[in-house]
């Protein structure tokens, strides 16, 4: 169950506004979007039509899913707003984007991405550490993309800067088809 004792209804996805170098990233994003929709869950994401963001949203929409985008007005020139979303929230800035995405989602999944995705990932993981939410946090390690990050997290524990229990809050999946099952298991065992 989530913090409020409710089942997962919506999944917030953090991911890149670019496709990355390998075709596997786009394919995994699309598979996740389809899996979220097929599971009857709503998808919440950054609102853009480009990169992995566009891939995850398009796949969920094609599968008949409900997709909510959250896009800062200042990013409109950079991240092309998706015209086919169920709902698009235009917010004042990145802080408002992250706050609303956190509020709308009952679980978080981080796909490959750059600095913005990393910042979103670490903030939501930190909020979990601080007890500000008790929602599942999944890292989708497509093609080993996050292997260096996972090594860094292990390093923070070994060096005494993070507790193993804090890092253990993170659920790691290697393939998109694992994510929904991991989320469901976390609800029943969390």
Image: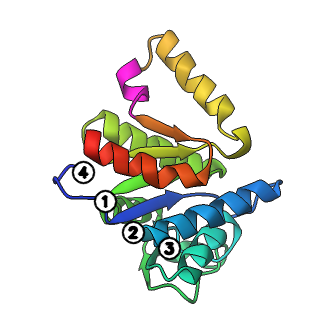
Picture disc at residue 43:
none
**Residue where numbered disc 2 is placed:** 41
Quarter where residue 28 is shown: bottom right
Q: Residues within 10 Å of mark 4 (few under 14, many from 20)?
A: some
Image spot of residue 171 (x, y percent)? 46, 38
How would you rate the neighbour count of disc 3 (Cα within 10 Å): few for under 14, some for 14-19, many for 20 or more?
A: many
Mark 4 or 2 closer to N-term? 4
Q: Residue at x 41, y 28 (%)?
A: 168
**Earlier along the polypeptide chain: callout 2 or callout 1?**
1
Front in this rendered view, residue 161 or 3: 3
Locate the C terminus by quadrant. top left
Residue lying at the far top of the rendered structure = 159
Which secondary structure lies at badge 4?
loop
- The magenta region covers 164-169
Dot placed on the residue nearer the N-terminal end, 2 or 3: 2
x%, y% of residue 164?
41, 19
- The percent position of residue 97, horizontal first and vertical second, equals 43, 65
- Element carrying mark 1: loop
- Mark 1 and mark 2 in contact (Cβ < 8 Å)? yes
- CA separation, marks 2 and 3? 20 Å
Q: Are marks 2 and 3 in contact (CB under 8 Å)?
A: no
Q: Residue at x 43, y 61 (%)?
A: 12
Residue 29 in view in this figure = yes
Residue nearer the viewer, 41 or 70: 41
Q: Which residue is mark 4?
A: 2
Is the C-beta separation of discs 4 and 1 under 8 Å?
A: yes
Residue 138 is left or right of residue 80, and the answer is left
Residue appearing at x 71%, y 38% in the figure: 144
The mark found on residue 71 in the picture is 3
């Amino acid at each position: 169950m989530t913090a409020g004792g409710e089942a997962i209804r919506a999944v917030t996805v953090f991911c890149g506004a670019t496709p990355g170098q390998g075709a596997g990233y786009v394919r995994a994003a699309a598979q996740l979007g389809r899996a979220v929709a097929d599971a009857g869950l709503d998808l919440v994401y950054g609102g853009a039509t480009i990169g992995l963001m566009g891939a995850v949203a398009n796949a969920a929409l094609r599968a008949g899913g409900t997709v909510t985008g959250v896009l800062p007005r200042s990013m409109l020139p950079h991240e092309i707003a998706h015209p086919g979303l169920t709902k698009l929230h235009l917010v004042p800035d990145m802080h408002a984007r992250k706050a609303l995405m956190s509020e709308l989602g009952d679980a978080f999944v981080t796909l490959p991405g750059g600095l913005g995705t990393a910042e979103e990932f670490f903030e939501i993981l930190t909020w979990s550490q601080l007890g500000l939410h008790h929602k599942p946090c999944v890292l989708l390690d497509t093609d080993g993309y996050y292997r260096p990050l996972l090594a860094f997290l292990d390093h923070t524990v070994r060096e005494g800067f993070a507790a193993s229990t804090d890092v253990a809050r993170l659920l790691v999946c290697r393939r998109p088809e694992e994510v929904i099952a991991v989320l469901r298991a976390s609800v029943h065992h969390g």
